[in-house]
Amino acid sequence: MRTQATLLAAWIRPLLYYLQSQGHDPDRLLKRAGICAEPLGLPGARLPVAQVRHLWGEASELTGNPYMGLMLSRWGDQLRGDTLLTAMITSRDMEEACRRMCRISHLVCDAVDLSVEQDERDLRLVYELTEGERAGFSDAGLNLALLPVLTMMEQGVMARSGIRRLELNRAYPGEASATYLASILPCNILYGCARDSLVLDRLATKQQNPFWNPALAQACESLALDELAQLGKQSIVNRVTGLIIKHLSGGEPHQQQVAHELAITPRHLQRKLKQQGYSFSRLLEQVRRELACHHLSRPDTSLAEIARQLGFQDQSNFCKAFKRWQGETPSQYRRRHTLLH
């Protein structure tokens, strides 16, 4: 059974803020795409790539702009603190940043493999869909694939004039779309190519980054590699966590229900979780506890609504469980959190 490709949820923040700036309601769009908004603020939260494609399709239809993602580098501050981006924008130069991105990009999205090819004139960043993601490089894929590079340029690592051309493995989209895309990217755009590649001026990629910080770049890469290793080890934990979150608002999820969705037996699921040091009940409690703290930081959400979203039968059961977890009632936690912030 193949694990579905996922995207680090933080990387859709620029899209959501862009939509909000254009007068649209991001929460409504998330709901239409089948994405629960609450867990997006949790560190390390991930989304199935299929859901992200759906979200991008909804956003494209709403705005009439399938290439809006190529403008999202202006909202790069929404990615502040991201491990991958910090590692790249503190690299020595654009070449080092691209090579570093190839090593750790799966932390952001494991649907695409990146590689670097070079000659005397060009540095080519090649994008290849991973096995099982061969449906084609969608508009969403193009937008998200170029976002890290364009954000680096927005941050001053290299000027956009250093882009020589964009080679796309897709048919010519028509004059209107091609003209619009060319207005966003200051380079030649070729269609019908064998691979999807961004070709950079080799000389420009060797110019020293004014924000070079070798110690910070290496520390972030090491952290990213550790997180990648942990992500691989805990893939079953991540998948079960996602299913628990998906079903919580409909009542407390059961191990049999989750095992059925994973196409394995409850006993097999129990064994796989135990190998990672978890039980289903412990994981359910952990998810509820983290989401409860997240919800309580938002004063506009009532305790009754939080209890419902976390799958409790009533507010009383939620309050008892929360006090067991945190040593204080939800109201006490909310007041203390409000005073601190």
Image (cartoon, grey):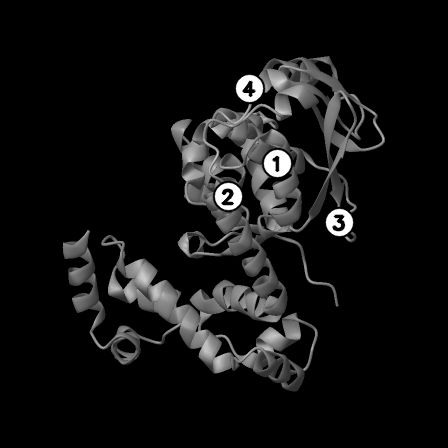
Residue found at the far bottom of this picture: 267
Nearer the observer, 206 or 9: 206
Badge 2 vs badge 1, beta-carbon distance below 8 Å: yes
Left or right: 235 with respect to 332?
right
What amino acid is found at the position of numbered circle 4 in the picture? Ala
Q: Where is residue 241 in the image (x, y as percent from the top left)?
A: 52, 67
In whole angstroms, how far apart are the C-alphas of marks 2 and 4? 20 Å
Q: Which of the two labelled residues, at mark 2 and mark 4, occupies the earlier sequence position? A: 4
The image shows residue 28, relative to residue 242, as above or below, that is above
- Check residue 96 in the rendering and tell me which mark sits there, or answer none: 1
Q: Residue 130 carries which label?
A: 3
- What residue is drawn where x is 45% and y is 80%? 282
| Image quadrant where one finds the N terminus | bottom right
Residue 208 has which mark?
A: none
- Please rate how many residues cluster around mark 2, counting C-alpha atoms within 10 Å: few if below 14, some from 14 to 19, many from 20: many
Mark 4, residue position = 159
